[in-house]
Image: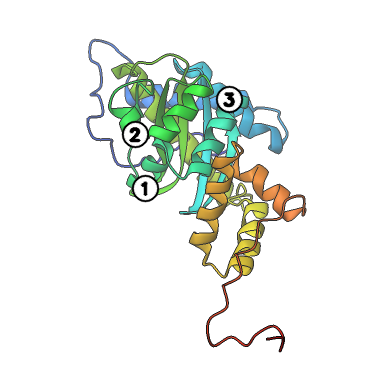
Amino acid sequence: MPGLTGVREMRPADGEPPEDGGGAPTGAEERRRIAAALAGAAEGLADDAIPEALCRACVRLLPVSGASVTLSGGPDVQSTWCASGPTAARLAETQFTLGDGPGRTALERAAPVLAADLTDGPDVRRWPVFAHQAVGLGVRAVFSLPLGVGDQAIGTVDLFRDTPGPLDAAALRTALRVRDVLTTTLLDLHARRRPPALDHPEIHQAVGMVMTQFDADAHQALDRLRARAFAEGRTLTQLAHDITTRRLHLAPPQDEPPTEADPPDDDTP
């Protein structure tokens, strides 16, 4: 598969583990191994099947339960490019719906965010609502690594475990190299003018409808949709679909009460 050889990296993470000595594979050797594994997973597949195959390959390369890749076209424009399974897909959608979580933080900081225990401790206090929903999905730990070059994050690869606990130094190094190879793959796809979708068309259509109905700006409209989705226990995508297909009508703002200057409805005393 093109684009899985020359690797361009983001800046190192704070506290990134050093290379092992004593005959361990060098960074270049490890990257070549990872690139070969991802290329092999995608070999012979149709273009639309490649993303899921790459996510599943990430799980085989790492001691994790699932993986997803989320791409960003701005603070409120995100798309799940691939997911290794239903739980990974739902976890990515949950972060976008809430506008919060390790992946969102990693995207904003352009640096890895490692939430080793979503059942207790500082990770729960940092993302209380996300942690509660993640645990409800069977997720106990999330490791979010930004995709991109330099300080420019174009998305994240989100890895999760169904048991709490950190990645050890070797696993974290491998995860960062997987991230590097995925970044190169995405940049190659973009250079070949076949970029993955960076948008949720129905969500943007729903945002536009809410902006018109409630005289709100785009951020206010999106916040309103997120709040409604969260209150109903649904994803933002599901809610947007119902709105754009007219299966759901948001309640209009309440009419303002008449003031003293308003004329009476009729002339009846």
Question: As rendered, which of 29 and 61 lies closer to the eye?
Answer: 61
Among the two numbered marks 2 and 3 on one chain, the one whose residue lies closer to the N terminus: 3
Q: What residue is disc 2 on? A: 113
Question: As rendered, which of 11 and 103 lies closer to the eye?
Answer: 103
Among the two numbered marks 3 and 1 on one chain, the one whose residue lies closer to the N terminus: 3
Circle 2 sits in a helix, a strand or a loop, which is it?
Answer: strand
The dot on residue 108 is 1
The dot on residue 87 is 3
The percent coordinates of residue 171 (x first, y second) are 36, 18
Circle 3 sits in a helix, a strand or a loop, which is it?
Answer: helix
The dot on residue 195 is none
Among the two numbered marks 2 and 1 on one chain, the one whose residue lies closer to the N terminus: 1
Question: As rendered, which of 46 and 260 lies closer to the eye?
Answer: 260
Identified by mark 1, the residue type is: Glu
Q: CA distance from mark 2 to mark 1?
A: 10 Å
The percent coordinates of residue 9 (x first, y second) are 36, 40
Residue 241 falls left or right of residue 81:
right
Instruction: Kindly indicate whether the residue at mark 1 contacts the one at mark 2 (C-beta within 8 angstroms).
Output: no
Question: In which quadrant will I find the N terminus?
Answer: top right
Identified by mark 2, the residue type is: Val
Residue 243 falls left or right of residue 258:
right
Residue at horizontal 30%, vertical 13%? 24
Identified by mark 3, the residue type is: Thr
Question: As rendered, which of 172 and 86 lies closer to the eye?
Answer: 86
Is residue 153 something that shows in the picture? yes
